[in-house]
Image: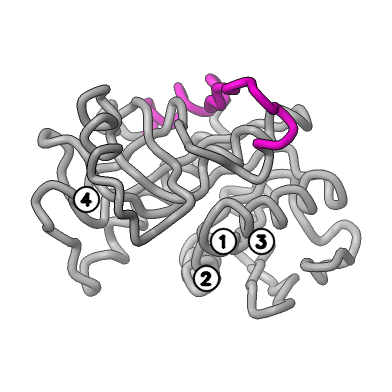
Amino acid sequence: MTFHIGAKPGEIAETVLLPGDPYRARWAAQTFLKDAVLVNEVRGMLGYTGTWNGHRVTIHGSGMGMPSLSIYANELIRDYGAKTLIRIGSCGAMQPDVNVRDVILAMTASTIGTPSSAIFRELNFAPCADFGLLSRAHAASGGAARVGSIFSSDTFYDERPDLAEQLQRHGCLAVEMETAELYILAARHGARALSVLTVSDHILTGEALPADQREQSFGDMVKIALTAAFAP
């Protein structure tokens, strides 16, 4: 057990999928895993371990934002031996040719700051995905997933339209709140990481995915993540 995860030794798999929402973790575990067992519910952050096509998998919530994700990713890697961490979450599109429901594979993640920023001091470290996971996820999508840079924001209600304009100008595909720190932690600890994201809303047009249509769209993302984790 750790401060934030109540799982016993051996109850966390080496491959962990990380949705932000703990209820989405429950839905994904019940939908995709065989014999899924609840292994954590400390502070309402649900985690389940089961199997997918014979492979052992944990699906564990990470909360909203990089500080929350940092807590869970650190403990999963350092205390439970997680070696592959794949974020499965939503994002907001920032380019006119990216559509709601598109799946985005985050090759890199720009950010203003993360919980790890103090370590680097003046250095602008460039966090990136594991190439093996990235290439297998792209293949698993049938080549349909968009691959490129995203922005990990430390605020949801952002009041920096000038920053959004520059990110759009430089080809940033989408914005979310966790990936940059996940990639940094994976690099630090020698783990593999990838973010597989579903576009749930569009920053430019205001379009948003209706709640009753999210489950199917998010299901595609989970399939891609699981296939990428275990493809030969």
**At x 11% / y 36%, what residue is drawn?**
96
Magenta segment, which residues? 117-140
| Secondary structure at numbered mark 1 | loop
Q: Which residue is mark 2?
A: 30
**At x 60% / y 60%, what residue is drawn?**
62
Q: Are the two marked residues, 4 and 1, in contact with CB atoms closer than 8 angstroms?
A: no
Q: Spatial distance from mark 2 to mark 3, Cα to Cα? A: 9 Å
Mark 4 / mark 1, whichever is N-terminal: 1
Relative to 41, residue 138 above or below: above
Q: Are the two marked residues, 2 and 1, in contact with CB atoms closer than 8 angstroms?
A: yes
Q: Quadrant of residue 61?
A: bottom right
How far from the left and from the top, in percent, is residue 103? 30, 42
Q: Residues within 10 Å of mark 1 (few under 14, many from 20)?
A: many
Marking on residue 50: 3
Marking on residue 64: none
Q: Spatial distance from mark 4 to mark 1, Cα to Cα? A: 23 Å
**At x 68% / y 34%, what residue is drawn?**
186
Quadrant the N terminus occupies: bottom right
User: Is 122 within the magenta?
Assistant: yes
Q: Residues within 10 Å of mark 3 (few under 14, many from 20)?
A: many
Mark 4 / mark 3, whichever is N-terminal: 3
Q: Spatial distance from mark 3 to mark 1, Cα to Cα? A: 5 Å
Q: Could you tell me the amino acid type at mark 2?
A: Gln
Q: Which residue is mark 1?
A: 33
Q: Spatial distance from mark 4 to mark 3, Cα to Cα? A: 27 Å
How far from the left and from the top, in percent, is residue 201? 22, 56
